[in-house]
Image: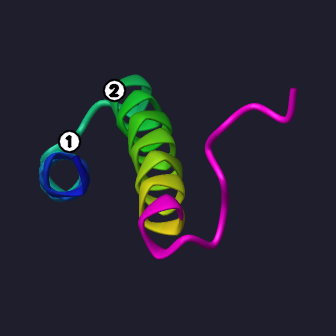
Amino acid sequence: MTIALEIQVEELRLELKNVCDTAERRQIEGELELALADLAVALAEQDGAIDAKPPF
């Protein structure tokens, strides 16, 4: 799962370099932020730093 997220992050970074439209730039920045957050959670779960199970 993390490989797919890493690929998504890199693709979004590349798109961000080539975008000219301000609205599209904001959209890609938002998608990149979410992808980076998902990647951080996935990596923390792999390392055992967090438990993904609900507390109840």
| Total numbered labels placed on residues in the image | 2
State the residue at coordinates (75%, 31%).
54
How far apart, in angstroms, are the residues tagged by discs 2 and 1? Answer: 7 Å
Looking at the image, residue 47 lies above or below residue 55: below
Seen as rendered, the residue at the extreme right is 56
Main SS class of the magenta portion in the image:
loop
Please provide percent x and percent y for residue 7. 12, 53
Residue designated by label 1:
19
State the residue at coordinates (41%, 55%).
39
Indicate the quadrant where residue 28 lies: top left
Seen as rendered, the residue at the extreme front is 56
Give the quadrant of the C terminus: top right
Q: Is residue 50 magenta?
A: yes
For the residue labelled by badge 1, is the local secondary structure a helix, a strand or a loop?
A: loop
Q: Amino acid at mark 1?
A: Val
Which label sits on residue 32?
none
Q: Is residue 33 left or right of residue 19?
A: right
Q: Nearer the viewer, residue 55 or 33?
A: 55
Q: Which residues are magenta?
A: 45-56
Q: Nearer the viewer, residue 55 or 13?
A: 55
Please provide percent x and percent y for residue 43. 43, 66
Residue designated by label 2:
24
